[in-house]
C-alpha cells in the first residue's frame, strides 16, 4: 500500500503489513522500487494522488505482468469522477471493457 497517512493507516488496520506513507514524487518512486525489488510482491495498491506524482513511472509498471498495480481513490478524490480500478484492470488484461455500468 502506497499513499497518504490516513489511507495507509486504514490499510494497516485492515491487516496490510507493507504500507508506505508518501508525500513527494521521490517517496513514491522509492516505495515502488522497494515493491518491485521484492519477488513476493504480487499486488501494489496506491492512491490516485500518489500515482499522479509519478504517472509515467506508474504507467510503465502497469505494463508488467507482475506486480499488479491498482489505484484507489483517496481523500482528495471527493467529487471527482474516477475510473473503477477493477474495471480498468480487466480492460487492461483482457483488452476490452467487459463490465457494463447499467
Image: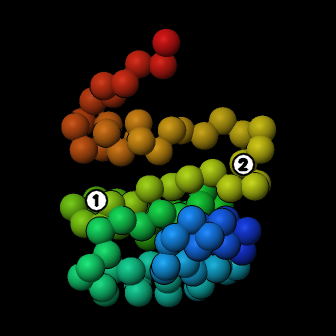
Q: Residues within 10 Å of mark 2 (few under 14, many from 20)?
A: few
**Residue 6 appears left or right of 45:** right
Q: Residues within 10 Å of mark 1 (few under 14, many from 20)?
A: few
**Residue 18 in picture, x, y percent from top left:** 48, 80
In terms of depth relative to the viewer, which is nearer, 58 or 22? 22
**Residue 71 appears left or right of 97:** right
Q: Is residue 38 above or below residue 53?
A: below
x 50%, y 87%: residue: 30
- Quadrant of res 76: bottom right
In terms of depth relative to the viewer, which is nearer, 37 or 63? 37
- Quadrant of res 26: bottom right
What sort of colour scheme is used for the picture?
rainbow
Circle number at residue 6: none
**Residue 50 appears left or right of 17:** right
Does residue 28 show up?
Answer: no
Q: Which residue is mark 1?
A: 63
In terms of depth relative to the viewer, which is nearer, 77 or 6? 6
**Residue 33 appears left or right of 66:** right
Mark pair 1, 2: CA separation? 24 Å
x 30%, y 85%: residue: 38
**Residue 24 in picture, x, y percent from top left:** 67, 80
Q: Is residue 85 above or below residue 30?
A: above
x 26%, y 79%: residue: 40
Question: Circle 1 — which element?
Answer: loop
Question: Circle 2 — which element?
Answer: helix
* Pair 1/2: label in front: 2
Q: Is residue 85 above or below residue 50?
A: above
Q: Which residue is mark 2?
A: 77
In terms of depth relative to the viewer, which is nearer, 42 or 51? 42
**Residue 37 in picture, x, y percent from top left:** 31, 87
**Residue 32 in picture, x, y percent from top left:** 44, 78
Between discs 1 and 2, the one toward the N terminus: 1
Amino acid at each position: 500500500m502506497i499513499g497518504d497517512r490516513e489511507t495507509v493507516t486504514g490499510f494497516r488496520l485492515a491487516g496490510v503489513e507493507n504500507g508506505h506513507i508518501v508525500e513527494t514524487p521521490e517517496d513514491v518512486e522509492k516505495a515502488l522500487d522497494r515493491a518491485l525489488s521484492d519477488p513476493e510482491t504480487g499486488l501494489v495498491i496506491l492512491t490516485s494522488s500518489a500515482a499522479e506524482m509519478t504517472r509515467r513511472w506508474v504507467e510503465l509498471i502497469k505494463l508488467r505482468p507482475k506486480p499488479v498495480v491498482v489505484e484507489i481513490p483517496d481523500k482528495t478524490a471527493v467529487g471527482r469522477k474516477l475510473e473503477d480500478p477493477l474495471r480498468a484492470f480487466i480492460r487492461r488484461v483482457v483488452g476490452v471493457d467487459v463490465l457494463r455500468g447499467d
